[in-house]
Structures are given as C-alpha cells and as structure tokens.
Image (spheres, rainbow, N blue to C red):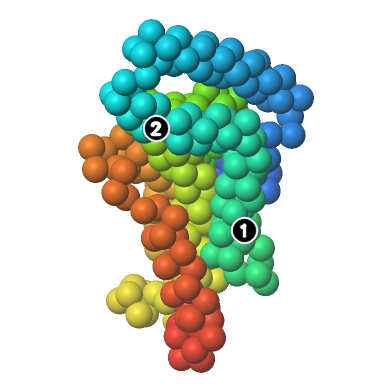
Amino acid sequence: MGFMLDGILDWFADAILDVFNTLIAAITGALLHTPDVTVLPQVQALTGRSILIVDTVFVLVFVAAGALTMTAGGDERARYGVKDLLPRCVVGFVAAHFSQLIAGILIELANALTAALTDPRTGADGGLAGIKTQMGASRDHLGGLLFIVCAAIIVMLLAATAISLIVRFAIALVLTTIAPIALAMHALPQTDPLARLWWRAYAGMLAVPVAQGMFLAAGQWMLLDTAHMLPLLGLPVEPGGVINLFVVMVLLWTAVKVPGWMRRLVTAPGARNTNIVGAAVRIVVVQQISRVIPGIGRLAR
C-alpha cells in the first residue's frame, strides 16, 4: 500500500513540475520586459486614426475660437481667454503628434531601469532561474506530500503571474493606442486631469516589471546565497528545504500583488503627488552604491 501511495505522489510531483517548467519557459524573457508596442502595425494604424480625430477636433476648436473672438469684438476678456488657452492648445497638439515617440522613450527607459536593478551576471531572468533551481533541489530533497502541496501553490502563483503579464501587455496596447487623444486633453483645463491620468497609468504600467525585478532580484540573492542570507534573517540553512519553497512562494505572491499596488497608486486621490520615477531612480542609486562598497556588495550578493 505504501509503495502504491509513493508512486501516486511521485506521479503528482512529476505532473506539477511539468506544468511548472512550462509556465517558467512561457514567461522567461517576458516577465520583466515591456515590448515596444509602438512598432506594431495595428498600433500604428489605430494611432493614426486617433491623430486624425485630434486634428479634426483642433481645427473645429480653432475655428470656433476665431468665430467667438470676432463676434465678441476683440474685448479684453476674449483676448485674455485666447492668451490663456493658446499655450495649452499648442502643448496638447504637439504632445498628441509625438505621443508614439514619447511612449517608445518611456518603454526604453523602463526596460533600462529594470536591467539596472538586476544582477548583470545572471540577467533579468535570474530570479526565475533561481526559482527553477530551488524547485528541482526541493524535489530531490523533500518529495512526498509536503512538496506536492508547496509545488501546487507555487504553480498557481506562477499561473497568476503569467495572467498578469498578459493583462499588462493588453493595457500597454490600449494606453499606447489612445495616447494621442489622451495627451491632447492638455489643451483645456477641464480635460487636463484626464491627460494626467494617462501619464500616471502609463508610468504605473511600466513600473510593474521594475518593481517585480526588484523583488525577484532580492529573492535571487536569498535563494543563491542561503549560507549568508538565511542566518542573517534568523532562518536555518536548509539547501533544497521547505524554507526555500516558502521564499519562492512569497516572491511569486509579491509578483502577483505588484500590479494591484500600482493600480492603487495610479487611482489614489493623491496619486498625482506620487513620484514613481523618482523613487525608482533612488532605488537604482542605492543598489549601485551597494555594488561599489565592498562590505555592502558582499551582503547584497
């Protein structure tokens, strides 16, 4: 009876590992990278339509403004209104036509920031490679029902991470497509909050892989340097043990939660005062300093 139970557990463990390896292969190379969606023909076609809408609206606005100025007789209030709105209209018009260039630059900066946060020796996917290594070691070290339960939780978290990755790409497509219309909203004080919302949403979308890269890099240090990291945290050194599986679960749970945290930052009432880019730059500076200073560098690695 025990032999049969062991065979069933081994079959479940192998099946879970197959699903795990498939998910890892699917998201490796894509989880911490935002593709430049501005080069897609579909995005360029839809963006062209958005720019056509913006041009039509601006022509109508300028014609209406000229008609109102003429009918008002050029009094002081009309001149003040034109003087106040003309710079806004210029900014909105120019930003709408350069929206794809702006989006491409933002994506490039986000990818460069993610690369700066990861260890150059292991690459941007070093955290996922460390998770895969620990899963294999735990399979050989633990086995049995405990490994199956932990592995099943890890696979579910990994699947949720893959789903959030697809959702992020879809959001990138939508936000990039509507960028001309959204940035044209800078033209009026009444619609300016919508343009600011687009900036926050785009920054939050790009900040998701940056934050995930930070957590995975920290987890990579813990998984690959257990002899130093775990005792520092008061945890036992147990290569391939259950503690490492718990570390993997926490890492993936954090990766799943990051998009929700960014969504709250974007939609919060005080979100306009949240400087995501500034915070990310400060983190990069701290990490680069930790690599330069010998004592901190050894602890980080």
191 relative to 228, above or below:
above
The image quadrant that residue 38 belongs to is: top right
At horizontal 67% and vertical 72% (from top left) the residue drawn is: 121
The three-letter amino acid code for the residue at tag 2 is Lys
Q: Which of marks 1 and 2 is nearer the N terminus?
A: 2
* Residue on which disc 2 sits: 83
Residue nearest the viewer, comparing 214 with 275:
275
* Numbered disc 1: secondary structure: helix
Q: 44 or 284: which is nearer to us? A: 44
Residue type at mark 1: give it.
Ala
Q: Which residue sits at x=58%, y=65%?
A: 116
Q: In this rendering, would 286 be left or right of 114?
A: left
Using residue 202 as the reference point, say whether residue 124 is left or right of it: right
Does residue 163 lie above or below 251 as drawn? above
Q: Would residue 33 be seen by someone viewing this image from the given angle?
A: no
* Cα–Cα span, label 1 and label 2: 40 Å
Residue 31: % across, % down = 59, 45
Disc 2 secondary structure class: helix
Which residue was labeled with disc 1?
Answer: 112
Who's the residue at 56% across and 59% down the image?
113
